[in-house]
């Protein structure tokens, strides 16, 4: 009886979703909003080689600010609820391979993260991607050297500093008179160079630092409550 | 072109298999690893679908960070259970 009911429910759900498949037609061109973003005049105004970054930081800058705020809130809530107890854990010694490999790989992974967010306006990637790559380096650090303390004060400082700088740059646009979060407050530079696209590289670098610091902070919080 | 489509379908099937493992496997450890595998295959699929930035995020967060956090939480739950069992005895 109960299974029959579930079957009927599933069939009804399938019937509801069926038009999505039967009437599906792939997009032939850009939608109106994307067409506006991709017009040559607008691309020349922003001057970023990576159009995705131009959309994320400039046109949808407010969404990015919201995402950063959400991440900040979740990190703050986690550190509010988790109370670290300083007691030693008895752990098996790590294998030599893991320790040696992580010594070799850690700087390279952090370097890759920094590369991704500094080149966010030229190549695919950006602040969030670079930040999460840095956080994955912190995972490796925590796995290879579980005893090593993470300097949480520094992470907190970095996080608040980069968040404040991001909002300050965003507000600068309003002060200058171009609008909140306008990235053309700085000179455009030449297309495709590292120092170009106005304030986008600066904003994305600070977002990258902020995301990396926040995710590493969350990880170290979770590690600190493992010992009981 | 055909080659790409076949790879994409293979990846999608692998993702589905991983998802089913993550749902029905009895051992929690294997289920968590399988859910990390879903993220890994999804990131390769995003790369094939020409979304390299999404692929980067998915690879780092979907298969790295969440797996580690799940393991931490699992470890906590286990140690709590052990303490309860010891007090019960």
Image (spheres, helix red, strand yellow):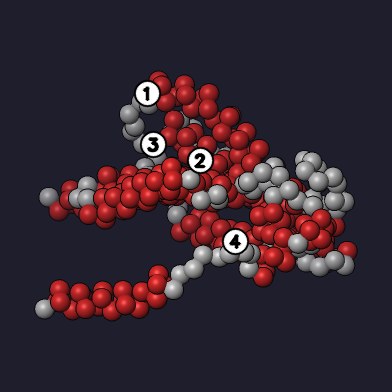
Q: For the residues carrying marks 4 and 1, which lies nearer the camera in this image?
A: 4
Residue drawn at x 38%, y 26% as measured from the top left: A94
Q: Which mark is residue B66?
A: none
The residue carrying pointer 3 sits among few (fewer than 14), some (14 to 19) or many (20 or more) residues within 10 Å by Cα, namely: few
For marks 2 and 1, give the one nearer the viewer.
Answer: 2
User: Marks 3 and 1: in contact by CB < 8 Å?
Assistant: no
| Circle nearer the N terminus (2, 4) | 4
Question: What separation in Å lies between label 4 and label 1 (alpha carbons)?
Answer: 39 Å
Along the line of sight, which residue is nearer the eye, A224 or A210? A210
Residue under pointer 4: A67
Name the secondary structure under disc 4: helix
Q: Is residue B2 visible?
A: yes
Q: CA distance from mark 2 to mark 3?
A: 24 Å
Q: Which mark is residue A88?
A: 3
Above/below status of A77 relative to B69 = below
What SS does tag 1 mark? loop
Quadrant that contains the N terminus of chain A: bottom left
Nearer to us: label 4 or label 3: 4
Q: Nearer the viewer, residue A28 or A88?
A: A28
Q: Are marks 4 and 1 on the same chain?
A: yes
Cβ atoms at labels 4 and 3 below 8 Å apart: no
Residues at circles 4 and 1 in contact by the CB criterion of under 8 Å? no
Q: Which residue is mark 1?
A: A95
Q: Position of residue B34 (x, y in %)?
A: 32, 46
Task: Label 2, secondary structure: give it.
Answer: helix
* Lower position in the chain sequence, tag 2 or tag 1: 1
Q: Which residue is mark 2?
A: A136
Residue under disc 2 on the same chain as residue under disc 3:
yes
Task: Give the chain letter at badge 4.
Answer: A
* Residue B11 appears anywhere in the view: no
The CA span between labels 2 and 1 is 20 Å
Nearest to viewer (mark 1 / mark 3): 1
């Amino acid at each position: 009886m109960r299974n029959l009911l579930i079957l009927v429910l599933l069939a009804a759900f399938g019937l509801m979703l069926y038009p999505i498949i039967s009437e599906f037609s792939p997009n032939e061109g850009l939608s109106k909003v994307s067409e506006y973003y991709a017009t040559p005049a607008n691309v020349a105004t922003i001057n970023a080689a990576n159009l995705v970054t131009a959309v994320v930081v400039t046109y949808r800058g407010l969404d990015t600010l919201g995402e950063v705020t959400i991440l900040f809130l979740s990190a703050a809530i986690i550190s509010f609820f988790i109370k670290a107890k300083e007691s030693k854990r008895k752990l098996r010694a790590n294998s030599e391979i893991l320790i040696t490999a992580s010594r070799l790989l850690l700087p390279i992974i952090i370097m890759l993260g920094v590369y991704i967010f500094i080149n966010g306006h030229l190549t695919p990637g950006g602040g969030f991607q670079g930040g999460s790559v840095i956080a994955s380096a912190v995972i490796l650090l925590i796995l290879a050297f579980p005893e090593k303390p993470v300097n949480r004060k520094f992470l907190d400082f970095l996080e608040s500093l980069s968040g404040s700088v991001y909002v300050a740059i965003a507000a600068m646009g309003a002060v200058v008179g171009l609008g909140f979060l306008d990235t053309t407050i700085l000179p455009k530079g030449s297309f495709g160079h590292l120092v170009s696209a106005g304030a986008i590289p600066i904003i994305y670098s600070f977002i990258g630092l902020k995301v990396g610091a926040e995710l590493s902070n969350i990880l170290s919080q979770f590690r600190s409550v493992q010992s009981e | 072109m055909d080659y790409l489509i076949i790879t994409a379908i293979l990846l999608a099937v692998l993702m589905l298999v991983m998802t089913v493992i993550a749902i029905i496997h009895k051992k929690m450890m294997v289920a968590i690893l399988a859910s990390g595998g879903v993220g890994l295959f999804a990131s390769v699929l995003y790369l094939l679908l020409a979304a390299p930035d999404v692929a980067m995020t998915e690879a780092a967060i979907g298969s790295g960070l969440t797996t580690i956090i799940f393991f931490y939480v699992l470890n906590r739950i286990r140690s709590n259970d052990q303490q309860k069992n010891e007090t019960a005895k």
